[in-house]
Amino acid sequence: MIQRLRLSPKLLCAALLTAATLSGCYALDPEMKRTVEARKAQGSAAPASPAPAPTPAPTATASNAAVPEVDVRRIEVVRGMTALPPPSGAPATSPADSGEPRATIIPGLTALPPPSSSGPEADLPPPPAPATDWPVRAAATDPAAATLAGQTVDAIATAYVSLSLEIGTHEKGYIDAYYGPQSLLDASTAAPRDQKALLVSTRQLIAKLEEIAPDLSDPIERQRRAFLAAQLRAAETRLMMMGGARFSFAEEAERLFGVRPALKPLKSYDAALATVDALVPGDGPLATRVEAYLDRFTIPKDRLQGVFEAAIARCRGRTVAHVALAPGDSFELQFVTGKSWSGYNYYQGGYHSIIQVNTDLPIRLSRALDLGCHEGYPGHHLLNMKLEEQMVKGRGWIEYSVYPLYSPQSLIAEGTANYGIDLAFPGQTRPDTERDVLMPLAGIEPPSDDRYWQLLDAMKALTGARLTIAQQYLDGVIDRPTAVQLTEKYLLVSPARAEQSVSFTDQYRSYVINYGLGEEIVRAYIERGDPDRDETWRRFALIIGEPTLPSDLLAR
């Protein structure tokens, strides 16, 4: 269901004009452009002299009167934009001839070489260069330029939403959620442009964001601009892929999701396999023994509804103790078949989600809390709810009313959703909840020892193997049957579950990094400095309620 948002007539007009006429990006208002350029030229030409006494900042009324709004009817093709590094092996593009240094390191999208340290975070992607190293100008001190830049960001945000909705008409599943104005959706999808035209428009919007970056003086506006730039870079990459472009696994992941994964060789997981083997002794392949043991904890189909409702209720209760929920939040639980995933959250807007659980394969008890936290609280439902509450309704930032699946937003979403399981149920609280509450509801006899939970913990150390298998498969190092066999061996699953896992990789490609790697990045950020439980939840709430990119979470 699409939820309508109330917009001012001014913003709604901009939205409709954007959807109907935008083929590039917005020109500055001619009069304001001359004023800003004259002030900049005057400042650069003036001889060095003592700084004049500061003058009081203009009042809001005076500023609004002096600075006209961006005219969305004018269209400008901007030259000299900065692109991401070219695909591996391709020559680098030369800088623009404008004489102005351009940023070649894209915040949140371009990673530096892996660090040589071997500390606990050595396997995480390295952080981007400090902001002081980016070859861009300092923030503008001209209030008029800053105001105009902010208005331009507003216009670009509306253009980004319209552009995303148009791209969604070319690829099923590209839009994961939309709850903005129905009028903008209708206008954007009535006559969508072809992929080449959308690619041109995406690059023009990126260039305009780069152009106005030095004029944004408010830190939150800079964060907003960086978020839009990262999302548009991902859109550019996805459009290129729709047109037939192919990148290496690592490069694709970096372009779409904002980090370049550092993958371990499969043999590095052999020690974890040995730990699991000691927990499930016996004859035959280890994966077969593990599957047979875990099958004892399968939830009967006629008890799925009750078990999952109880699990989600527990997840919600533990979340609401630390994070205030939006008024009237709700979800609908559905059981489906014929999917490559085990669970999915379809956020509907208005603080409501549809949570689907795939029943193609038998569902084990461990999945109840996993999916309850991941898809519900404090996972996808909470994140989308807080974005709608704080960003769309609180700040009026329309760009957060659309969620393109193939974007840095997904690494934040999946990483926080996975981490949210341990956040909500730390230590012994999870085994206690499963043993005392969920197993009786499922009609499962609780085990007499802790081997079941020890096994689940030991298997977490194998999570990264999925990324290495996906990389080898998508880069053509191994074929599909080999990918299935390696998935059986290293993820310790049955042939049917291995097929489902590889089918997910077929469909979503490098998206798989967002789960394990996303969780590692979120965990390292939140737990840095060994915070107490209240501080841990506070950091988590900030990640999901503020404009956050993967690069923001990486240690510098």
Image (cartoon, rainbow, N blue to C red):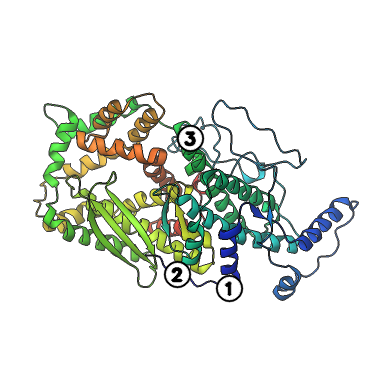
Q: Earlier in the sequence, mark 3 or mark 1?
A: 1
| Mark 1: amino acid | Pro
Which image quadrant for residue 423? bottom left
Q: Which residue is mark 2?
A: 4
Image position of 432 (left or right of 480):
left
Q: Which residue is mark 1?
A: 9
Image position of 145 (left or right of 284):
right
Q: Which residue is mark 3?
A: 244
Residue placed at 75% from the left, 71% from the top?
58
- Secondary structure, mark 2, is loop
| Marks 3 & 1, CB-CB < 8 Å contact | no
- Within 10 angstroms of label 2, few (less than 14), some, or many (20 or more) residues? few
Residue placed at 45% from the left, 64% from the top?
388
Q: CA distance from mark 3 to mark 2?
A: 36 Å
Locate the C terminus and report the quarter of the image it occupies: top right
- Secondary structure, mark 1, is helix
Q: Residue furthest bottom?
A: 61
Instruction: Give the number of the mark in front: 3 or 2.
Output: 3
In the displayed structure, 186 sits above or below 166; it is below
Residue 102 % position (x, y): 69, 41
Which one is in front, 361 or 2? 2
Residue 151 % position (x, y): 65, 63
Q: CA distance from mark 3 to mark 1?
A: 41 Å
| Mark 2: amino acid | Arg
Residue placed at 54% from the left, 28% from the top?
88
